[in-house]
Image (tube, helix red, strand yellow):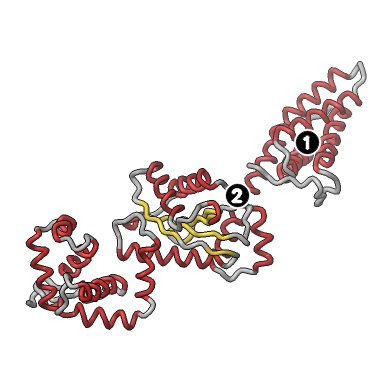
Amino acid sequence: MPVRRDDDSEGDVGAAPPDYLAEIFEHVARRITRDEQPLGSQDLDDIRLAGSKAAEHGMTVGEAVDLYLVTAASAWGAQSTEGSQQAKGRAVINAIRAAVPMLVQGYHNAGQSLIQQEEANRVEIIDDLLRGDVDVASMVQRAEPFGLDLSASHQVVLAGTRGGAQLDQHDRILFKRAVNDRYGDRNVLVSSKASYIVALIPWMALGPDVDEPARRLRDDMRRSDPRRHWRFAVGRPHPGAYGFARSYQQAREAMNLAERLHPDDDMVPTRDLLIYRVLGRDRAALAELVENVLTPLTHARGGAGPLVDTLEAYFAAGEVATETARRLHVSVRTVTYRLAKVTHLTGYDPSVPTQRLTLQTAVIGARLLPWPNVEHSDPAST
């Protein structure tokens, strides 16, 4: 794991990291060559601590081991005389054999701690950005280690599943890999939130198409795991620290609308959701329209459900009865019969442009509310 190295930082050690480590190594090596005794528990603890400090200050494990070996060899040469060289050599070699595993263990323990701390910081900063109530001054400092430019425009991509399947660790790994492969790991953050995987992506790298990142990631995930039924949504790009929350709310709204209105689609283009947002802003007026237009359909045999489904498929098929029949898996005659029934009950003819608009808006409203009478119609009524 790459760790940021700060050679100007003294921290608790009082000297640059290599000097501090060399001091520990030299102390241990000189005691061994002088006393010709195995390393004690305190010596091993010191070596393990040195490994931790090496990781924290950005040294590789190879550099830390090399420093220890060089220091031990130097101490051996300084302390050895011709008569005692063989015994001291054995003591140093045994000390090296005992110390190197401790050195590596300390290094890797510190590395794991740094990884865990970085992941915790990543989750925390994403939560704060998506919540939208951040202190910008402190957030700028916290975002710097992740290469996040809060002055730039970003957008949020949400990834979930269709059919209520739960995301697992394998899904998260594949998604993060897809994001990093396509956009790199700088100025990009990936985490989990609620039942979704969230990606914060810089807008400048994507081009003019708002849906481009979701579309690309959808295609990447299809290739990675074609058996998984994904659903993607994206928010519009917004600048600044508060832009993340705006984009996230739009992505959540798009995901909710897609789940309600297009349950079989893996993605709904952002532009197609604008009309739903407009309609949903005045729910009282929308509910009144739905009730006035669609309530007569509840008196049909079988209830309003089949008729509303037929209208929805008919509008989606471009008002073509044959395509509507194919989508609904019924005959063309059934489609034309249902459309005639709608006209008879409501007084609105889907073949007349102005009346078609009223019917289509009412059908959309029924899905948005949702309209309860669709599911609670009276099958016995005619």
Residue 378 place in picture, x, y as percent: 13, 76
Identified by mark 1, the residue type is: Gly
Query: Which of 72 and 32 lies nearest the eye of the viewer?
Result: 72
Identify the residue shown where x is 81% and y is 25%: 91
- SS class, disc 1: loop
Q: Nearer the viewer, residue 10 or 256?
A: 256
Q: Give how far across and how far down residue 261 sits, in percent.
A: 30, 65
User: Left of 201 or right of it: where is 196?
Assistant: left
Q: Which residue was labeled with disc 1? A: 40
Q: Is residue 57 or residue 181 the one in the foreground?
A: 181
Around disc 2, counting alpha carbons within 10 Å, would you say few (fewer than 14), some (14 to 19), or many (20 or more)? some
Tell me if 361 is positioned left or right of 52 in this view: left
Instruction: Report how many numbered discs are placed on residues in the image.
Output: 2
SS at badge 2? loop
- Based on the displayed image, in which of its 4 quarters is residue 338 positioned? bottom left
Q: CA distance from mark 2 to mark 1?
A: 44 Å
Disc 2 or 1, which lies upstream in sequence? 1
The residue carrying pointer 1 sits among few (fewer than 14), some (14 to 19) or many (20 or more) residues within 10 Å by Cα, namely few
Q: Which residue is mark 2?
A: 186
Q: Is residue 199 above or below residue 247?
A: above
* Amino acid beneath label 2: Arg
Drawn side of residue 133 relative to residue 82, left or right: left
Q: Report the residue at 50% width, 45% height from top.
A: 182
User: With respect to residue 49, does 162 lie above or below?
Assistant: below
At x 35% / y 48%, what residue is drawn?
Answer: 228
Residue at screen point 65% across, 48% down: 114
Which quadrant holds the C terminus?
bottom left
Give how far across and how far down residue 58 sits, in percent. 72, 42
- Residue 228's mark? none
Determine the image quadrant of residue 135. bottom right
Nearest to viewer (mark 2 / mark 1): 2
Quadrant occupied by the N terminus: top right
